[in-house]
Image (cartoon, grey):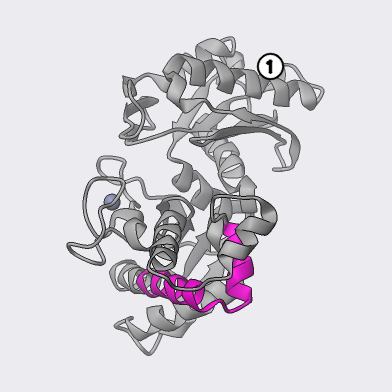
Amino acid sequence: MPKDRGTNDQPVVGVDLGGTKVLAGVVSPTNEILATAKRATKAEAGVDVVVERLAKTVRDAVSGAGLELGDIAAVCSAAPGPLDPEAGIVRNAPNLPGWDNVPFARLVSEGLGGLPVFIENDVNLGTLGEFVLGAGQGYQNIVGIFVGTGIGGGIILDGKLWQGTHKTAGEIGHAVVLADGPVCSCGSRGCLESVASRTAIERDIWLGIKAGRESGVTGILKRDNRQRLTSSILAEAYAATDPLVTEVIGRAQFYLGVCVANIINLIDPELVILGGGVVEALDDSFLEPIRRTAYQYTLNKLDAKSIEIVPAKLGDNSALLGAAVYARQRLARE
Ligand SMILES: [Zn+2]
């Protein structure tokens, strides 16, 4: 391996690039996070601004760890997709204008003095992080589902990230669970994301309130001087068994359970990991109804309950740590 490509006994930087914030972390060869940095993404300002802010955040994290860019073996960043991780190209980002066939890895590399830069889908990275360092340790066949403003999924088969023929595998958020249901962010109807994401839960709670249903969330919003139903506000109302919130979340849990059963019937994994803001905030009380529905709809009743359905363990750091793992895998391969 040429020296300038770095080695696997140097730190790498993992980056979780989201629509609102970019979080970079310097990760040691033993997978400890040495330092992190974050700033707003400003996704609406275009590719060049995002690349510049991402590179700045990586530099901040590196200097926060008392290191220089030259000490870093490689960088891996989550990126919007569909994307080509081998070529480092974002093929398209449906919600971001100007993101068509962007050589994202090369642009970030140029902003970081030519460091090797890899990209992957954030949820694939989150699943990889959980597989190597979180809830999936010790398993070979796992599926990760992350529930937040959207829903994404990642698949590990025989110990390897399954990227699919066109590198777009794992899009469980767009599995259609209610044909002709609500319009999804992808333009289709009735995707899991359109009935079970935080966005969908929030929409349905407001629909209930506008229709005259009573709910404690209006009081919580007033008390906290907030407008949005964040995951923590949902968790508080759910814990207080607010009838409207319980009903709406129950519907989301049902569709998530149906989807988990579909995954089990299709892939027969050892483990299904649920993560993301909503799952983290509501914890195991959110998962139990999902397990019940999933096992009910699993074909192989004899073994259904041996397929564990568990919460993610790495919290906000799953994609960052998964990115570090992916960077090392790519360095070892190239
Ligand atoms: Zn969709």
**Residue at numbered disc 1:** 69
Q: Residues within 10 Å of mark 1 (few under 14, many from 20)?
A: some
* Rendered residue at 57%/65% (across/down): 217
Membership of 319 in magenta stretch:
no
Residue 283 rendering spot, x and y as whole percentages: 61, 68
Q: Position of residue 151 (x, y in %)?
A: 41, 54
Q: Is residue 26 left or right of residue 94?
A: right
Instruction: Examine the rendered structure and indicate whether residue 180 appears above or below residue 321.
Output: below
Quarter of the image with the N terminus in it: top right
- Residue 181 falls left or right of residue 3: left
Displayed quadrant of residue 250: bottom left
The magenta stretch is 231-255
In this picture, is 212 found above or below 86?
below
Q: Residue furthest bottom?
A: 302
**Residue 241 lies in magenta, yes or no?**
yes
Place of residue 200 in the rendered image (x, y in percent of width and height, measured from the top left):
39, 58
| 186 versus 99 height, above or below | below
* Callout 1 secondary element: helix
How many marks overall? 1
Specify the quadrant of the image occupied by residue 280. Answer: bottom right
Q: Is residue 76 visible?
A: yes
From the Cβ of disc 1, is ligand 1 less than 8 Å away?
A: no
- Magenta segment's dominant SS is helix
Q: Is residue 137 visible?
A: no
Foreground pick, 232 / 295: 232
In the rendered image, which quarter is residue 113 located in?
A: top right
Front one among 144 and 162: 144
Q: Position of residue 327 (x, y in %)?
A: 55, 33
The single residue placed furthest to the left in the displayed view is 180
Instruction: Return the residue nearer the eye: 95 or 33.
Output: 95
Residue shown at the point (33%, 20%) measured from the top left: 98
